[in-house]
Image (spheres, helix red, strand yellow):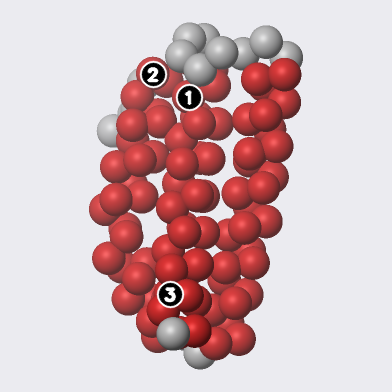
Amino acid sequence: MAVKSGELQEAAQQLANEIEAHDQEGLKALTDGPLREQFDAGEELYRHVDALWQKAKQDGFIPGPPERYTALAGLRDLAGQLMESAGLELANREH
C-alpha cells in the first residue's frame, strides 16, 4: 500500500504508536549498557532529523504545505518517539 505524500507524517505517527508496546518490551529486555546505546543512537538520529527540519524552517518552510516536507516531519516524529521510549526506560531504572 502506497502512502500519499500528504499522509506520510500521519502514517509515521501511527507507526510510532503501533510499535510502542513492542519497543518498550524490547527496551526492558536490554541490560543497562545496550539500553544507553539505544537511547544514544535514537538521540543522534533525532538530532540529525531535527537539524534538517530546522534548516527547512530557516529556508522559509512553514509547517503545512508544501507536502514534500511531510516525510521529514514524520521521520522526526518517529525518531522522537523512539528516543523518548528509551529515555523513559532509562529514567525508570534510575529510580
Q: Earlier in the sequence, mark 3 or mark 2?
A: 2
Give the number of the disc on residue 84.
none
Q: Is tag 1's residue or tag 2's residue first in the polypeptide sequence?
A: 2
User: How many numbered markers are drawn?
Assistant: 3
| Location of mark 3 (residue) | 89
Compare residues 80 and 69 and report the one nearer the observer.
Answer: 80
Estimate the x, y position of residue 9 in percent, counting from the top left: 40, 31
Which residue appears at 37% of the width and 67% of the height?
23
Residue at the spot of label 1: 70
Give how far across and how far down residue 83 sits, in percent. Answer: 51, 59
Dots 1, 2 in contact, CB < 8 A: yes
Disc 1 packing (10 Å; few <14; some 14–19; many ≥20): many
Which corner quadrant holds the C terminus? Answer: bottom left
Q: At label 3, which amino acid type do we have?
A: Glu
Mark positioned earlier in the residue sequence (1 or 3): 1
User: Which quadrant of the structure image shows residue 51?
Assistant: top right
**How many residues crowd mark 2 within 10 Å: few (<14), some (14–19), many (20+)?**
some
What's the amino acid at mark 2? Gly
Which residue is under mark 2? 6
Mark 2, secondary structure of its residue = helix
Residue at point 48% right, 24% down? 70
Label 3 crowd bin: few (<14), some (14–19), many (20+), radius 10 Å: some
The quadrant holding residue 58 is top right
5 or 24: nearer the viewer: 24
At label 1, which amino acid type do we have?
A: Thr
Above or below, 43 against 52 in this view is below
